Structure formats: structure tokens, C-alpha cells
Image (cartoon, rainbow, N blue to C red):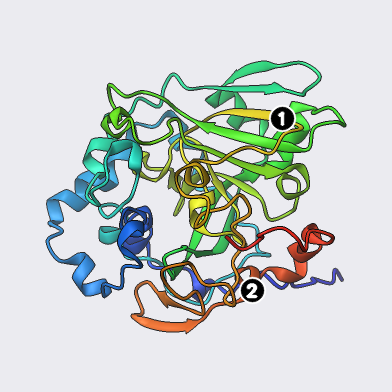
């Protein structure tokens, strides 16, 4: 009889954030300059029309990868809250590429996601490009339920579909001298009008160490809630690293570059004193303009204590041994 060992990040089914709240998470980031946004779920839902919801939900049906979903859930990952309500999830977003307002999901529909080519280069055995659908065919797709903690002190639990980032690293065959993987998002200012704002350092760039990228938790998400990823949430590829603040989870990825130099990320470029390279969750290290000690759970309208590494410390803390001089929690 097989013995199932439950891991510390495994959450029961009921922990999944209601779907209607999920898609809206990046909308909060636009308020960073003004501090954390503390609206109630009811206030966030105000003004959402039923026809808008149906339209937003239907936008993923033209994705040619739709036939791949739903994928089998990895039962290691459980949750204990109900799924996010779909209405809020599909109409309340942040995606700076499409503007700084929160209601950008309609603009995001103009982004073409086919053809979509992913470039893998830098310190690898052989640089190459691969079509997104060819990449998906090579990857071991599964669903994982993860906690998600925004730097603005709110949280949710999301059922991501996708594949371990480690599988892509294996495909890339980086050289032993590579220390980081740099992820670059798309550039298309004719469609993504926010990219016409010259005061932002486009394109969006993020990065992980090789050790972080090959950690079991690091995940490339290609879908949510048993469907392809909506455009407003980062289709066709986005990062999910649940022990870090949400701004690390870059969207619309077109390039993975392996390098021996630490990437200078998008928000670090804008304000390094507030948004650093590591961005690991820590309730004891406040943001310069608000506390990180507690978080508001979307859909429940209550605050709960924030956990170190968002509760995943047992599995990732060793990644940072010997880095005591680093600002790991910015």
C-alpha cells in the first residue's frame, strides 16, 4: 500500500480562492504609489455587469491550447477556501503593459497570442526558439493549487495549470556557469498601449537564481481554473513562485535567458528601495509605506497573519543560506 507524504505547502481543496477574485489581482499593483488597497470584495464587484463577465470568460475559447484543459490536478496541492468568484476574477486586473487603470481586461484582448515564439538563449548548450504550442506539447502539464501573496498585503489561493519551471530548464540545457534565468515579457506597444509610457523600463523583466528556478515549487502557468490563461492574466506563459511577492510573477513571457549576471528587474529598476530582486515574503520586514505583518484574504474580507516565505519556508529557506547580507525580503 503506497504511503502518501503530505508536504507543508499542500493545502486542502477548500483553500482555493474564489475564481471571480483571481483575475483582478494585478489591478492592485497600480496602487503601489499610493499604498495598499483595502477595498472590500463587495466594493470591487460594484459596477461589474453580467454581460461583461460573460465576454471576459469567453475570451479564452479562441485559444488553440483550449483542448489541453483541464489537466490532472497534482493532489499534493490542496486548498481550504472556496474558488474565487469568476466575475471579479475576469474583470479586475493590473497589467501595466495595457495601462495603469484597473479595468484593463478589455484592452488585453487585443494582444495576439498566436503566433507566439519563446526564445531560450544565453549560457545554454544551443540557443533556440520554440513555438508555444510545441513547447506545451513537450511539457508535463498539471494543475497546482498555490497560495499567492501580493506585496500590497492581500492574498488568495489559485489553481494554476502549467508545468514545473525545472522542466523548461532541463529543456534549455544551461551551462554549468549559468547562475540566473532572466525572463523577458513581450514588447508590442501598438497593442499594449502602456508600453508607450517612456518612464517605464519596458519590456518587463524578472529573474530567478538557477537554484530558485529548479526548486520544486517554481511553476510556469499556462492556465487557471481548468482553462487556458486569459490574456489579462498573462497568456500564454507566466511565472508562479508562491513564496515570493506577486510582482515577481511576470506575464506574457517571450524569452528565457540564462546568464551569470543577476537580472535587474522591472520594479527594481523603478524603485529599488521598495522592490528588490529577491522579494521573498516576510511579515517582519515592512514595505516602506505599509506593514506586511498581516494580509487581507480576497473574498473573505478578513485579515490573517502573514507567514514567512508565505508558508513555504520549510522548502525554500535553504535557498538563502549564506545570503544574510542580502535584502531578501524586498
- For the point 42% across and 83% down, the residue is 303
User: Under tag 1, what secondary structure?
Assistant: strand
**Mark 2: few, some, or many residues within 10 Å (few <14, many ≥20)?**
many
Q: How many marks?
A: 2
Q: Classify residue 23 as left or right of residue 161.
A: left
At horizontal 76% and vertical 71% (from top left) the residue drawn is: 314
**Up-down relation of residue 253 to residue 317 (above or below):** above
Residue 17 or residue 33, whichever sits in front? 33
Image location (x, y in percent) of residue 265: 55, 41
Closer-to-camera residue (320/311): 320
Q: Considering only vertical position in the picture, is 122 above or below 281?
A: above
Q: Which residue is mark 1?
A: 258
Q: Position of residue 271 (x, y in %)?
A: 46, 49
- Quadrant holding the N terminus: bottom right
* Label whose residue precedes the other's in the sequence (1 or 2): 1
Tag 2 secondary structure: helix
Image mark for residue 308: 2
Residue displayed at 26% across by 72% down: 39
Which quadrant holds residue 329?
bottom right
Residue at 83% across / 62% down in the picture? 321
User: The C terminus lies in which quarter of the figure?
Assistant: bottom right
Location of residue 24 in the rendering, given as x and y in whole percent from the top left corner: 33, 56
The answer to whether residue 158 is above or below residue 4 is: above
Residue 69 shown left or right of residue 11 in the figure: left
Amino acid at each position: 500500500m503506497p504511503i502518501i507524504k503530505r508536504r507543508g505547502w499542500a493545502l486542502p481543496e477548500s483553500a482555493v480562492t474564489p475564481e471571480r477574485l483571481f483575475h483582478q489581482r494585478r489591478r492592485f499593483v497600480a496602487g503601489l504609489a499610493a499604498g495598499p488597497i483595502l477595498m472590500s470584495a463587495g466594493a470591487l464587484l460594484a459596477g461589474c455587469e453580467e454581460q461583461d463577465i460573460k465576454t471576459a470568460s469567453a475570451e479564452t475559447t479562441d485559444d488553440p491550447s483550449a483542448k489541453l484543459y483541464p489537466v490532472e490536478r497534482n493532489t499534493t496541492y490542496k486548498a481550504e477556501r472556496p474558488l474565487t468568484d469568476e466575475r471579479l476574477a475576469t474583470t479586475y486586473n493590473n497589467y501595466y503593459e495595457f495601462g495603469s487603470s484597473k479595468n484593463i481586461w478589455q484592452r488585453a484582448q487585443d494582444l495576439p497570442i498566436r503566433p507566439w515564439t519563446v526564445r531560450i538563449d544565453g549560457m545554454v548548450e544551443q540557443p533556440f526558439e520554440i513555438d508555444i504550442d510545441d513547447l506545451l506539447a513537450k511539457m508535463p502539464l498539471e494543475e497546482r493549487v498555490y497560495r499567492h501573496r501580493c506585496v500590497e498585503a492581500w492574498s488568495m489561493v489559485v489553481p494554476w495549470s502549467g508545468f514545473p519551471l525545472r522542466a523548461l530548464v532541463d529543456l534549455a540545457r544551461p551551462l554549468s556557469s549559468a547562475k540566473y534565468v532572466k525572463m523577458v515579457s513581450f514588447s508590442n506597444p501598438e497593442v499594449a498601449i502602456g508600453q508607450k509610457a517612456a518612464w517605464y523600463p519596458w519590456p518587463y523583466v524578472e529573474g530567478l537564481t538557477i537554484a530558485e528556478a529548479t526548486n520544486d515549487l517554481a511553476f510556469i502557468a499556462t492556465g487557471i481554473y481548468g482553462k487556458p490563461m486569459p490574456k489579462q492574466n498573462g497568456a500564454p506563459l507566466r511565472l508562479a513562485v508562491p513564496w515570493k511577492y506577486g510582482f515577481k510573477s511576470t506575464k506574457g513571457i517571450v524569452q528565457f535567458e540564462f546568464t551569470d549576471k543577476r537580472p535587474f528587474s522591472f520594479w527594481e529598476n523603478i524603485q529599488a528601495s521598495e522592490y528588490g530582486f529577491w522579494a521573498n515574503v516576510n511579515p517582519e520586514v515592512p514595505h516602506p509605506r505599509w506593514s506586511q505583518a498581516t494580509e487581507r484574504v480576497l473574498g473573505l474580507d478578513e485579515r490573517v497573519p502573514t507567514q514567512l516565505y508565505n508558508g513555504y519556508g520549510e522548502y525554500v529557506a535553504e535557498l538563502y543560506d549564506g545570503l544574510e547580507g542580502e535584502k531578501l525580503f524586498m
